[in-house]
Every structure is written in C-alpha cells, then in structure tokens.
C-alpha cells in the first residue's frame, strides 16, 4: 500500500468518524430540546410555590414535595375521571375499528355502482374543518336529548365518521391479494366471513396503529366533553385538569400550580405507556400514512 493510498483511507475513516460524531451530537441536542418540557413538568410537580415563583426560574426544586401527588389526586376526583375517560376512549376505539374497517372493506373489495364516486365524496369530508359541523352536530344531539350524556362522544364513532382511517384501511386492504378472497369463496365463506376471518386477522399492524391514534386523540379530548357534558360525575381527565388551573391552597391562599403539574404527570402516564408499548406500530403507521399520502 502506497503512502497516498494509506492517507486516503485515513482521511476517509476520519470523515466517517466526524459524520458519526456530528450525528450523535445532533441527536443528543434534539433529545434534550424535546424532552426538556417533560422534564420541567416532572420536576415542577415536586416544587413548592416559592420555587415556582422564583425569578429567574430554577430547574431543580429546593426540596421535593411528594405530597403534591396525593393532594392533586384528591382535590379533584381523578379516579372517577380516569374511569370515565377510559370508557369513552374504549368505546371510540371499538366503534372506529368496527365501522371504518367495514366501510373500507366495501370500498376495497366489493364492486358496486358509484363506488369511486362515493369514495371521493367520503374523502371530500376530510377537507371540512370540525368547527364547520360543530353547531349542526350540537343541534342534532340536543334534539335527540343526548346533551349532558356520553352519547355525543361515543355513538358517532360507530358510524364510520373517521374518513382518514377508512382511507388508511382501504389502502391496506388493496395491498392484500385477491386470491385470498377467491380461495375463501371456494371454501364456502361468505362476504362477511372473508372480511372477519380472512382479511381482519392480517390487518393487525394497521389496526394497532389506528387504536393508538384513537386512544391519544380521545384521551386528550377537551373540547368535546366541555361542549356536551355539564354533570360533574361525567367529566373526563382533561376537564379535571382545567379545574386545577386556578386552584389555590386552602391554608395559605397561594396558587398551587405544582398540583396542576402533578396531575398532568399522572394524566400523561397512560399516553406514555401506550406510546412505548405500541411504539413499533406507531412508527410503522406514520410511515404507512406517508406512503399513502394522508
């Protein structure tokens, strides 16, 4: 090996190490940048009012106030709110998966007149902002006597109102070979049997992705419960957090923002658990939505 060749490989190795080192530095900076709000919330949940009012702000609390968590849990009935939110979120997951998959199966595997036209009409509903339909929906639910109940927050999910999920499922159904349907028909399987026994078991990744998206959107939903629910026993965790925003201490009369931060921490835990458990499907869903042009 000549001196010029050895120098070339040393320069190449140096450039590779430089690129790798730069990538690591950028990744660490990105991690610190995006995780700082979460770190600030967790550390702030242990602070006293004096620590939170200190100027300039201090990151680390002078002393850890562990009692903020039981106080935040009891000052507002978060136990009931957790159950309420879990029921609403679970009903929406079941309704969206059942209804959207059936509609997507029809658009993807069944031949009928006007299929492409109706599919285009369905896609056009994605362009309507939710604020446009807010007042008509409220008037309809009020006429039905559903205001102040959970029906406006759960029943629409069973009527395939999520056009984006229908589109996503239809695109996934189209990737499955039609020979599966033909083989099932030869074995005497009905259309619903093909949908339920053949195609749906193959849709595990996309169904898991939709479940994660649905869980996140409905667990954090604040506007829907605020509009339709006025009874305290039906409130959700997002409404409970709003109650703590202006809370003050009964002993000192001081604001207790630390309780709001503590409540935000334990209300975010289900989201973090769902995200880390389903992280693989979450990333795969983002990649799939990118390929299908959502």
Image (cartoon, grey):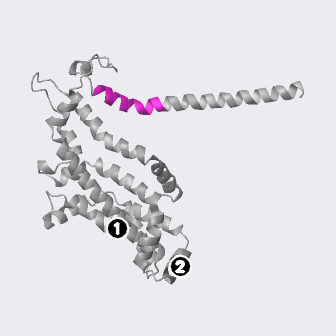
In this rendering, would 228 be left or right of 197? Answer: left
* Image quadrant assignment for residue 151: bottom left
The answer to whether any part of residue 131 appears in the image is: no
Q: Where is residue 103 in the image (x, y as percent from the top left)?
A: 39, 71
Query: Residue at the location (46% across, 63% down)?
Result: 203
- The single residue placed furthest to the left in the displayed view is 250
Query: Residue at the location (34% across, 62% down)?
Result: 96
The answer to whether any part of residue 91 appears in the image is: yes
The overriding secondary structure of the stretch rendered in magenta is helix
Query: Residue at the location (32% across, 44% down)?
Result: 270
Query: Residue at the location (27% across, 61% down)?
Result: 133
- Position above or below: 49 against 269: above
Q: Earlier in the sequence, mark 2 or mark 1?
A: 1
- Element type at marker 2? helix
Q: In which quarter of the image is the N terminus?
A: top right
Q: How far apart are labels 2 and 1 at the CA level? A: 25 Å
User: Front-most of 181 and 116?
Assistant: 181
The question of residue 43 being in magenta is answered with yes
């Amino acid at each position: 090996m000549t001196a010029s060749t050895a120098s070339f490989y040393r320069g190449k190795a140096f450039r590779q190490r430089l690129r790798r080192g730069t990538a690591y530095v950028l990744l660490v900076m990105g991690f610190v940048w995006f995780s700082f709000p979460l770190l600030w919330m967790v550390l702030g949940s242990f602070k006293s009012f004096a620590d939170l009012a200190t100027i300039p702000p201090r990151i680390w609390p002078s002393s850890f106030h562990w009692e903020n968590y039981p106080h935040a849990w009891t000052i507002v009935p978060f136990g009931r709110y957790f159950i309420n939110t879990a029921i609403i979120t679970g009903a929406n997951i079941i309704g969206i998966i059942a209804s959207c998959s059936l509609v997507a199966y029809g658009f993807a595997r069944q031949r009928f007149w006007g299929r492409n036209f109706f599919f285009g009409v369905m896609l056009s509903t994605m362009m309507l902002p939710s604020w446009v339909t807010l007042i008509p929906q409220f008037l309809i639910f009020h006429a039905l006597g559903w205001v102040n109940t959970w029906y406006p927050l759960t029943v629409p999910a069973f009527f395939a109102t999520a056009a984006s999920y229908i589109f996503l499922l239809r695109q996934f159904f189209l990737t499955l070979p039609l020979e599966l349907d033909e083989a099932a028909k030869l074995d005497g399987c009905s259309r619903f049997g093909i949908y339920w026994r053949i195609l749906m078991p193959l849709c595990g990744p996309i169904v898991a992705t939709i479940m994660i998206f649905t869980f996140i959107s409905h667990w954090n939903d604040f506007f829907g419960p605020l509009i339709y629910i006025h009874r305290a026993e039906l409130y959700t965790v997002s409404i409970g957090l709003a109650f703590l925003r202006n809370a003050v201490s009964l002993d000192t009369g001081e604001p207790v923002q630390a309780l709001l931060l503590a409540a935000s921490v334990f209300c975010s835990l289900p989201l973090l658990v769902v995200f880390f458990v389903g992280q693989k499907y979450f990333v795969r869903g983002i990649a799939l939505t990118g390929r299908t042009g959502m």
